[in-house]
Image (cartoon, rainbow, N blue to C red):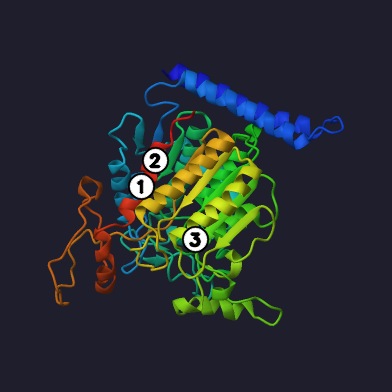
């Protein structure tokens, strides 16, 4: 079995390498008059992908290759402990795993649940890939800050500047650095598994999230880091496109599609601050100039940044950066104050699909945020769990048309998880018997879930449908679309 996996990996990597070399040969060759070079390149790509799919089909077996979906997680992500009152609670990870299990992970032999990120991926993430995505000053600042936290302390600001600003929402604990690095390691493992044919698609159940983490602290003039430390989607894209000679996989083009309710300013900052033909960043999010304001020569960015930290009606985090698309490597689609199913569907069909097909990626990465759900406590979306499944299926169809179905996702936002532990504030009034979300064995015995009374009230409606069901629907759509035809 191990020999077949090695043979499959070697053949598929060679196939994609030849695909890229062939594109170069055609691009720099003299083509007869009247013959379209674009058409020849398109047909060459299709021919290479047909060989890729044929190889996977012939060499697949139970648990490896065609028809296989994987879910990757690691308990070290639980070491990132935020403060009381944070939307980004530790129970997000057990809830995500519970949702994935409901979709068959760990029960179906072709829906794998992988619960450990190996040391080689952790080391590669820390020593090779993260330094390519984030500036050394940012990494050193974050690591030093986390190492200084006493082992028994939690909810410490991690991304505040020298003036003490910008750290109010991004807090953590002594285990936050390892949690963030292991999340990057999971995304690198996912790239390897998808590109080398071990599976068709992968969902990375990791935290903390990453799409607001950029080259430096608070990218693109954002008021904070938005719960994020290191950027898994960007790191996965960088690893995939790094040449084989430098330890990467040598892919020519990677597309990142971000459907979190917030614009992924960090991902755009890392991959597309200037045009880079290797990357296409697509973001569908709440926002727009009519909400965030119109920038003009007389405006002062600094005052606007502070304005975003005020009432929700004054702007949507992270600000103006997602209202426009600076060049052809970025497609930002702001959908207004609230993300609706009709607007999301229209954007996917009329704008995203044509642009992705034109770009023709070798791999698609989803920044999978579920905070546009109608019951999410942020209150910025109107999507159902089924809608997130539909979004995932559309993305999978794009992947099938351009890159033999190669697609993976990394968990970003999504906070609609009912309370999982009895509350300690027993002196506050209660109108009904307290309801708790039963995560069963997924909830570690030492994991607390302290939630303010007002937030608990908002989360009660998530018993009907919330984050867990969104993850379940997302993974179910991956399973539905894991057969290469």
User: Which of labels 2 and 3 is toward the front?
Assistant: 3
Tags 2 and 3 in contact by the CB under 8 Å rule? no
Identify the image quadrant of residue 20.
top right
Mark sitting earlier along the chain (3/1): 3
Q: Can you name the residue that lies furthest to the left here?
A: 433
Give the mark nearer the N terminus: 2 vs 3: 2
Residue on which disc 3 sits: 343
How many numbered markers are drawn? 3
Give SS at disc 1: helix
Neighbourhood count class around disc 2 (C-alpha, 10 Å): few under 14, some 14–19, many 20 upward: many
Query: From mark 2 to mark 3, how far is it between C-alphas?
Result: 31 Å
Mark 2 lies on residue: 72
Please determine whether, in this image, residue 90 is positioned above or below residue 472.
below
Which residue has dot 1 on it? 473
Residue at the location (37% across, 23% down)? Answer: 62
Give percent across and percent down for residue 132. 61, 48
Q: Position of residue 323 (x, y in %)?
A: 59, 66
Q: Residues within 10 Å of mark 3 (few under 14, many from 20)?
A: some
Residue 40 visible in the shown view: yes
Mark 3, secondary structure of its residue: helix
Determine whether 47 is above or below 346 in the image.
Answer: above
**Residue 188 seen in the current view:** no
């Amino acid at each position: 079995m191990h020999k077949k996996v090695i043979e499959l990996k070697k053949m598929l990597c060679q196939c994609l390498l030849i695909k890229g070399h062939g594109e170069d040969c055609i691009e720099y060759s003299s083509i007869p008059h009247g013959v379209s070079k674009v058409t020849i390149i398109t047909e060459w790509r299709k021919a290479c992908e047909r060989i890729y799919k044929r190889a996977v089909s012939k060499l697949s077996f139970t648990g490896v290759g065609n028809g296989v979906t994987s879910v990757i997680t690691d308990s070290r992500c639980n070491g990132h402990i935020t403060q009381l009152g944070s939307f980004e609670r530790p129970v997000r990870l057990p809830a995500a795993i519970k949702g994935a299990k409901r979709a068959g992970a760990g029960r179906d032999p072709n829906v794998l649940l992988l619960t450990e990120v190996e040391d080689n991926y952790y080391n590669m993430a820390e020593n090779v890939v993260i330094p390519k995505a984030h500036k050394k000053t940012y990494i050193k600042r974050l690591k030093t800050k986390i190492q200084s936290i006493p082992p028994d302390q939690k909810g410490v600001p991690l991304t505040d500047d020298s003036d003490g600003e910008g750290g109010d929402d991004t807090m953590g604990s002594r285990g936050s650095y390892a949690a963030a690095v292991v999340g990057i390691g999971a995304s690198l493992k996912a790239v390897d598994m998808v590109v080398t044919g071990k599976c068709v698609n992968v969902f990375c159940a990791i935290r903390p999230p990453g799409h607001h983490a950029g080259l430096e602290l608070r990218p693109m003039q954002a008021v904070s880091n938005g719960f994020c430390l290191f950027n898994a989607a960007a790191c996965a894209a960088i690893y995939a496109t790094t040449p084989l000679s430098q330890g990467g996989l040598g892919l020519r083009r990677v597309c990142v599609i971000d459907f979190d309710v917030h614009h992924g300013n960090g991902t755009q900052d890392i991959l597309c601050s200037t045009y880079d033909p290797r990357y296409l960043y697509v973001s569908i999010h709440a926002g727009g100039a009519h909400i965030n304001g119109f920038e003009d020569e007389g405006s002062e960015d600094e005052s606007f940044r502070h304005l975003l930290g005020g009432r929700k009606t004054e702007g949507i985090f992270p600000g103006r950066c997602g209202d426009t698309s600076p060049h052809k490597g970025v497609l930002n689609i702001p959908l207004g104050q609230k993300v609706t199913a009709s607007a999301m569907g229209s954007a996917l069909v009329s704008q995203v699909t044509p642009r992705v097909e034109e770009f023709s990626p070798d791999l698609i990465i989803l920044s999978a945020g579920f905070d546009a759900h109608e019951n999410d406590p942020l209150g910025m979306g109107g999507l159902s769990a089924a809608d997130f499944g539909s979004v995932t299926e559309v993305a999978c169809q794009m992947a099938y048309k351009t890159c033999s179905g190669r697609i993976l996702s990394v968990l970003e936002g999504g906070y609609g998880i009912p309370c999982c532990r009895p509350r300690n504030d027993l002196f506050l009034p209660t109108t009904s018997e307290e309801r708790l979300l039963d995560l069963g064995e997924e909830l570690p015995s030492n994991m607390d879930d302290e939630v303010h009374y007002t937030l608990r009230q908002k989360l009660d409606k998530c018993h009907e449908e919330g984050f867990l069901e969104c993850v379940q629907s997302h993974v179910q759509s991956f399973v539905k679309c894991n057969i290469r035809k």
